Image: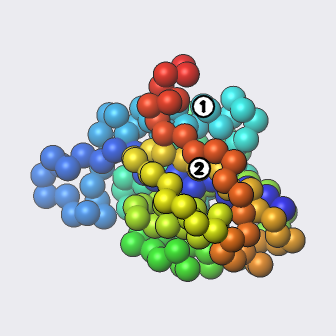
Amino acid sequence: MGSIYVMRHGKSDWSSPGASDHERPLKKRGRDAARRVGRFLTRIGEAPQLVIVSSAVRARTTGEIAYEAGGWEAELRVVPELYEASTGAVAEIIRNVSDEVERILTVGHQPTCSIFVSELIGGGAPAFPTATIARVDLHLGSWGSLRPNSGELKWLINPRLLEAAE
């Protein structure tokens, strides 16, 4: 059917004075990693057709930077429900995507990213350092039928591997 790319936001800046968790910005390292991910997906011919990002500044910025660096022509949706979302909430957001879309990128938070991927592939405990991205291919007829154990992990890449490959 299609592929879901699950990405954790880039490294955030904890030293930002007075910033709430939701408003915490990215560090330079987080911005650099987001650029790498954007370029990587374009380079391998897997640019997303839809980018769904949490409304938290660090996640939204990660998605926007990856989008720009990759030169994607995808729709970018800021979805407040992705902030502090359960895996069920993430699945419900994806279930409502048009079946014309084949590749969806979500940019969110831990521990939701690793748990969501684990549920999709039927187990395991994938590690999700900041700016890590996983590709899960689904064995479904439509996004609306998304359920646990309906996918296969194709790859999981952290930003250090991408940096070494550049």
> Which mark, by number, is residue 134?
2
Q: Which quarter shows the C terminus?
A: top right
Q: Which quarter shows the N terminus?
A: bottom right
Total marks placed: 2
Residue drawn at x 27%, y 55% as measured from the top left: 24
Residue drawn at x 50%, y 55% as measured from the top left: 126
User: Closer to the N terminus: mark 1 or mark 2?
Assistant: 1
- Local packing at callout 2 (Cα closer than 10 Å; few below 14, some 14-19, many 20+) is many
Q: Would residue 54 appear left or right of 21 to someone viewing this image? A: right
Residue drawn at x 68%, y 34% as measured from the top left: 42
Above or below, 33 against 131 in this view is: above
Residue drawn at x 76%, y 78% as measured from the top left: 144
> Which mark, by number, is residue 39?
1
Q: Which one is closest to the eye, mark 1 or mark 2?
A: 2
- Local packing at callout 1 (Cα closer than 10 Å; few below 14, some 14-19, many 20+) is many
Residue that extends furthest to the left in the rendered view of this protein: 17
Task: Give the percent coordinates (x, y) of residue 149.
Answer: 69, 71
Gap between marks 1 and 2 measured at Cα: 15 Å
